[in-house]
Amino acid sequence: MFFHELTLGCDALPGEVKEELVAFLEDVAQVRRGPLHVCTAFNAVYFGYDLDAGAYSTSILDPEAFTLLGSDIRNPLPPVGSFVRIERGAHSLWGEVCASFGASPDVEEDGWTPGALSGAPFSGGSEVALARAVIDWDALGALTSVEHKELARIRRSPAGVVDRWGHLVGTADTSGLVSGRDHSGLYRQFLMGPGQRLLAAGALGPLLQDSAGTVAAERALQECFRTLEELLRQAPGLAVWDLYAQPVDRHQQFASGPVAAEMVDRFTRPAPGGSPRYTAVWPVLAGWEREVGDEHALELTAAASAVVDANLALAFQATAGGLRRNVDLRIDDSWQQGGIWRAQTLPVDAVLADCDPLTPAGLGHLEHLLPGAAKRTGSASPRQTDSEVHVEHLDEALLVVSVALSEADLSAGRLPLPDAVPSLLGKGPLTLEVHHSGRLLDRDLARQHTQRGPGGLISVKWPDSFYPGIKITVAAARSGRQLIVTTMLLPDPVRVGNALLAWYFDPVLLAEAWGLLDFPPSVGPGLPTQRPTGGGHRPPVTALEVLIVAALLRDGRIGTARSRSLDGQQLSAAMFGPDVVTPPLLWTVIHTCEDMAAAGLLTRTMVAHDGVLPEVFTWWPDTEEAREAQRIAGGADTAVRQIRHWRRPWERRLPDGHNATPAARARYAQWRIKVDGPDADTELPEGHTFVRGHRRGEGQAPAWHQHLQR
């Protein structure tokens, strides 16, 4: 049910269908005993979750195709969403993995975590990464009394495949290109591989007969998961943490209880001296279970609910601005031990000042690798420059910084960066890949070696056409040694005095450098700023968009109508160097490209090659020849590609004497809060109304006269 609608994409869903889908997901979350993950949400839609029975039907699910659980912990645990079975003589137990997180033994019982563990990558060596999988044993129907007794025997047995809580503990999946932390990607990879037998029983079955159909099936599966992520975030009755959704009323019971208060008190304590303290969620919950003597608090699916509820309560504290003891609280690792949080006395380093506290940055592991970074707890030291520098995005894989260059930095050949940023990069010499939009740079400018120095990087040769205040975007992979730098062309050049300026700039810095009495005219918002996405694994990063276009223009394969194309892995390697293209970084680039394709900035196709299905992203010039080539390519590729053109919500001016209706004002307030957070200005300007977002050419908003009153 609903599967074909989900493959259209969230923006293309008719309003009635979207409401019905959201209501169904909310009902499934209410009926289930644990939280709803995007993978189990897919199962509910694809395999048909019976709300009345509170279980899946076995008419489409063949238990013989379920993953057989054995006693060998060396086998990687199945990802979230997997259907599993245990065979014990004449008895069979069936279940569904509803949650999974790290289970490292290096965390203390009180939750204290060594910084080196927070955000640490899977070693893949002799020290295996352990994980805990939470199984819903009632997913295919309530257990009988005999099955309950059998499960109890397994839990008591020291050689059983599940522990005393009814969970499966084993090794994390370190195989393949997908990160072992990304269970959405792991489950899709499983379904297109060993799990195809399960898919074949549903709507995708007819497509799995040949390679061309497999490409279309993979595309449909990706779009379905993406749509489900967005619908879970939009559901008013669900509270979402990462890829997990918990009914709001169920979460409120936890948030208003003593455990949530204890969690906030425990997790907001910095280490002695105000330095960072790392605390893990699962051990604290287990300690609370022991204190109150409730042996059922963390058994079976209750464990998943407790972990999600605890993280939601902490996330609210981190974003509500009401933390006690003047501390900075942020998630540092969303997977290990149910989540590791970082608490530090304010002020924090400048590199963290603008970063989303709900984006895991893996700072603990960084501080372990680079001890000097842990000591920088204050703001960056003052410098003799006045460049405007902002950290747009920081996570365990990627760093993006926007800079408006001052005249002093241009003259000194310096790239100003917050003090801690160079510590995030790899050791040894650094390389700058400079892209100057609309200009072909000489080789010595386009690729140059630079050095670390006071206040950033030195020995940089800036192009002669750079002027004070020019805005650049800088991105680098964490621990990488290649930085990509680019400018961005204005829609139309701006004349300032006798100069014609073609690239975005900071008018204040320009006016100060050139001694202008009047500020130059406003030239728009300039470089995009990343906003929190509210969940999802490897979300798109808006600040990467201009860098992606620059990399395609410089390194892309030339195609029809002088288009430029690269697949996701090639594009990531071109931007950051092939030696640091990790799965998290790769998927960040791919998801950003997919977001750009949804907005019509790129197009994407999928081709089968040696059993791999890489996504190819293409930039097209703004010419009639290119538009005609796109139309031809779109007609030949409609089975595997969708290009969405989305008109964002906006304010519309009304005729004199008219004002917006209360309903339009309420929708505007809701939209502003969603975009800018709870402190947003929600007052709709007088003489304006609010128009909802829609696809161009489809589902246009009501006529203006339906939105206003005299």
Image: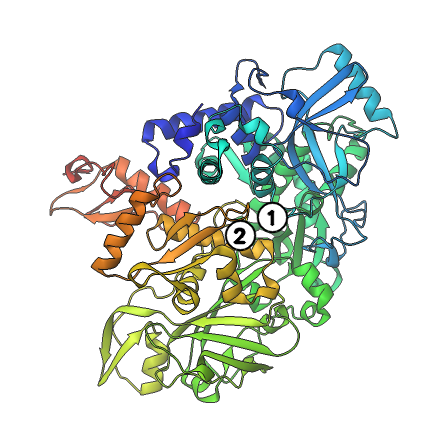
In-image side of 76 versus 331 (left or right): right
Q: Position of residue 260 (x, y in %)?
A: 65, 38
Which residue is at 29% across, 65% downward?
Answer: 524
Which type of secondary structure does the marked residue at label 2 adopt? helix
Which residue does the numbered mark 1 point to in the structure image? 178
Q: What amino acid type should be assigned to the residue bearing mark 2?
A: Trp
Of the numbered discs in the image, which one, if any, rests on residue 664?
none
- 178 or 584, nearer to the observer: 178
The quarter of the picture where the C terminus appears is: top left
User: Quick check: 573 above or below 137?
Assistant: below
Residue located farthest toward the top when viewing the structure as drawn: 145
**Disc 1 crowd, CA 10 A, few/some/many (<14, 14-19, 20+):** many
Identify the amino acid type marked 1: Val
Residue 563 location (% of width, % of height): 33, 61
Spot occupied by residue 11 in the image (x, y as percentages of width and height) = 35, 39
Asked if one can make out residue 348 in the rendered structure from this viewpoint, the answer is no
Q: Earlier in the sequence, mark 2 or mark 1?
A: 1
**Disc 2 to disc 1: CB gap under 8 Å:** yes
Q: Nearer the viewer, residue 388 or 457?
A: 457
Q: Nearer the viewer, residue 42 or 406?
A: 42
* Residue 649 appears in the picture as rendered: yes
Q: Which residue is mark 2?
A: 587
Name the quarter where the N terminus is drawn: top left
Q: Position of residue 567 (x, y in %)?
A: 47, 56
**Residue 300 in the figure: left or right of residue 710:** right
**Image position of 696 with respect to 364: above or below:** above
* Res 526 quadrant in image: bottom left
